[in-house]
Image: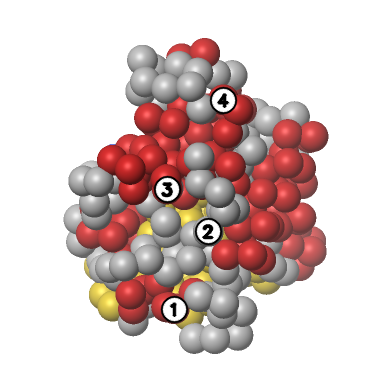
Amino acid sequence: MPERGPDFGPTSGAADARAGAAGARAGASPLLTVAGVSKRFRGLLAVADASIDVRAGEIVALIGPNGAGKTTLFNLIAGSLAPDSGSVRFAGREIAGERADRVCAAGIGRTFQLVKPFADMSVIENAMVGGFRGTADRERARDRAARALQALDMWTLRDRPASSLTLPDRKRLEVARALATEPTMLLLDEVMAGLRPTETDLMVAAFRKLNADHGITILLIEHVMRAVMALAQRVYVLHHGQIIAQGTPQQVTRDPRVLESYLGSGGVH
Ligand SMILES: Nc1ncnc2c1ncn2[C@@H]1O[C@H](COP(=O)(O)OP(=O)(O)OP(=O)(O)O)[C@@H](O)[C@H]1O
Ligand SMILES: [Mg+2]
């Protein structure tokens, strides 16, 4: 176990990308710029000419009803899918269509909406899957994983098999795995879904700390408005693949277009 506390500051490799967020606050030039991105699945235009930007040091939320295209937009940023058109720039470099491992190496860590840890592996071994980014050094991967688990208050669970974890703990482990890649920017896909309010508050506190103390920029997809209100400085609203509103959490939750988009889809909760 490392003596010092969690440290997700700049590391070797991808220095440019990492320098972009180091200590920077909102107001600097965008760290991530998604411009006019579209993605079609056969007949369905899942993401339609969407543009968002996130400045270094910001926490930005992406909300929208089920099926709006949120996860698809994450996949387009993180390299799981290539856009049909449009541009994705990260830390001054075009990354649209790049392989997921290269996007990760550039400094973007992402979680998956459906969490599937390796059930037979321990918690720390699962986090080490992220820790091996750009290295084959087991000790280095373990050190990164340990710091990620500590940051998420999971250190005491490190030797448990992942199969024994509750859903909230699986979600935290998914965040730990992404964090162990030592990202400049974290893309979090509904990591607070299914958590109780007290568990949500703990997760919110952990993200605030990662942002404030380690300069990690965060873009999160979230249905839990309690978390969005507590975390996000700005919010984008996606509906049928299009960005229909943006602003502060207070502004977007009062926007009639946003409320309308949620009608019949369970509402904002
Ligand atoms: N690989 C794929 N092939 C075909 N259609 C897809 C694929 N991935 C997503 N879709 C469709 O694209 C649309 C957007 O899906 P997406 O998962 O991005 O929505 P979402 O906003 O993340 O929804 P949720 O809140 O339910 O997670 C949906 O209609 C979905 O069925
Ligand atoms: Mg989704």
Type of amino acid under label 4:
Leu
State how far apart marks 1 and 2 are (Cα): 16 Å
Type of amino acid under label 3:
Arg
Q: Is the C-beta of the residue carrying label 4 under 8 Å from the nearest atom of ligand 2? A: no
Kindly indicate the quadrant of the structure image that contains residue 168: top right
For label 1, the residue is: 20
Q: Are marks 1 and 2 in contact (CB under 8 Å)?
A: no
State how far apart marks 3 and 1 are (Cα): 21 Å
Earlier-in-chain disc, 2 versus 3: 2
Q: Where is residue 122 in the image (x, y as percent from the top left)?
A: 42, 22
> Would you call the spot at circle 4 few (<14 residues within 10 Å), some (14-19), or many (20 or more)?
some
Type of amino acid under label 2:
Asp
> Would you call the spot at circle 1 few (<14 residues within 10 Å), some (14-19), or many (20 or more)?
many
State how far apart marks 2 and 4 are (Cα): 20 Å
Tell me the tag on residue 157.
Answer: 4
Q: Do the residues labelled 2 and 4 touch (CB within 8 Å)?
A: no
For label 3, the residue is: 144
Q: Is the C-beta of the residue carrying label 1 under 8 Å from the nearest atom of ligand 1? A: no
Q: Where is residue 103 in the image (x, y as percent from the top left)?
A: 28, 60
Residue sitting at x 61%, y 58%: 210
Q: In this view, does 155 lie to the left or right of 127?
A: right
Q: In terms of depth relative to the viewer, which is nearer, 236 or 6?
A: 6
Q: In terms of depth relative to the viewer, which is nearer, 71 or 148?
A: 148
Tell me the tag on residue 208.
Answer: none
Say above or below: 246 vs 2: below
Q: Is residue 120 left or right of residue 203?
A: left
> Would you call the spot at circle 2 few (<14 residues within 10 Å), some (14-19), or many (20 or more)?
some
Q: In terms of depth relative to the viewer, which is nearer, 145 or 75?
A: 145
Type of amino acid under label 1:
Gly
Q: What element carries label 4?
A: helix
Residue sitting at x 28%, y 40%: 138
Q: In terms of depth relative to the viewer, which is nearer, 208 or 52?
A: 208
